[in-house]
Amino acid sequence: MNCGLWRALEAMETPAAVLAEWRLLAGADYEAARVFLRPTQRVAAEYPCVAPDRCGCRHEVVEIDETRYLARCQCGMGDCPAPRLSAQDLIVYELDWERFGGAIALALGFEQVESRGVFASVPKVRCVGKHSATQALVFLAICPSEAQLLANLQCLAALERDPFFLLTPTPGHRSEVIAAFLRCHRCEIAALSRFLVPALNGRFEKSQSIQPVLDRFERLFSGDKEPLPSKARFVFQNIGSSWRVIYDGGPEFHIPDGLGAKYLNYLFQHPNEAISAYDLETAIRPEKAKARPKDSIRNGLDPETAREYLRELDGLRAKRDAASEDGNALEADRIEEEIGALELALRQPGLGADAGEKARVNVTKAIVTLRNACLRGSAPEKAFGRHIELCVSTGYEIFYTQPMGRVWR
């Protein structure tokens, strides 16, 4: 589907593809975008479907001889021809960040800056200029998802303590969580699709003035000349019957004590480390190790466990349907995985109800219950709940993703 340069950039996992794919995605903007693409040393193993009635699948590249190739459809869903390709057709072209960023800075009136190697560790983000009035750095972020954008913003804020101005191709990944993060750091965001149109001369033309957004940034920047507050930005502290929470420098709130909070606390203290659900459960509830050894497997489900699984299945199916109706595909897919695991346990009673499966169900239920309660709460609670949703993965292995490492106190 032709979607224009700005949406094409966010449609890719990384802004790199064969020219045929750039042409398909950028559509009418392709000729203007071509000047910002440069060839790499990489050769594609797959090729997009270029038939008029596209099947949508990735075609497998098959070598005919040393100079000729075939792009063969693998899905069998349509009568797609297998185009003949040359080695040149398979070269991967990537976005020339420096040239692209320079053209954007020129069009929007930002000062040019030298390459800033300190930010090279932040993927899919580049420093493209400086805002003259405030001398704040201007960054361009091209991320395929909200989760990636949030993770990269966290890395960026850890490196650049002063407020900065952020550019994204489209407003598609802007959310309450992203907005709260930027407000906390006195930063501003602008979507390039609102202000710039690609031109054929390697430049961009303005579709409307960005000055009102820059004026708002100046007010944010000058409204507090003091350093950012020294208080901890991430606090998760047990205070008896509740937990004190500060998420990313926002307002303090409290959540009730419970297993979900205890599991989260363990994960927050061990970021970017995979831990099995069984090991996490027994770390918080050591008595479970005695009652249910790690390698235990029951010979069939006892009636009470089977009834518990059936009740849980009913609840999960209702939640899955509600998530689908709300358009939350990510949550619906995650719930579908839980449903599949429970259905498998019920279909194979000789292999069900083992220690790992019981721990997976228990830990997931506790974390999801806490997360959902936060998502129904105040704005700071919702931001925290969304963070859990994006950064905590559940299953037989539990993982908390935090690009900045250990940040919680």
Image: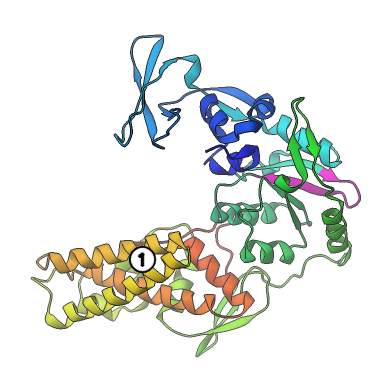
The part of the image, by quadrant, that contains residue 292 is: bottom left
Residue 269 vertical position relative to residue 166 in the rendered view, above or below: below
Residue 197 vertical position relative to residue 179 in the rendered view, above or below: above
The part of the image, by quadrant, that contains residue 188 is: bottom right
- In this rendered view, identify the residue nearer to me: 27 or 177: 27
Horizontally, residue 280 falls left or right of residue 103, namely left
Horizontally, residue 134 falls left or right of residue 322, namely right
What residue would you read off at disc 1? 335
Q: Magenta: predominant secondary structure element?
A: strand
- Identity of the amino acid at label 1? Ile
Does residue 295 appear in the picture of this structure? Answer: no
The part of the image, by quadrant, that contains residue 353 is: bottom left
Residue at 24% x, 68% y is 342
Magenta residues, start to end: 130-141
- In this rendered view, identify the residue nearer to me: 341 or 6: 6
Assess whether residue 314 is covered by the magenta stretch: no
- In this rendered view, identify the residue nearer to me: 194 or 146: 194
Horizontally, residue 133 falls left or right of residue 278, namely right
Q: Where is residue 309 in the image (x, y as percent from the top left)?
A: 23, 76
Q: Position of residue 214 (x, y in %)?
A: 85, 54
Does residue 94 appear in the picture of this structure? Answer: yes
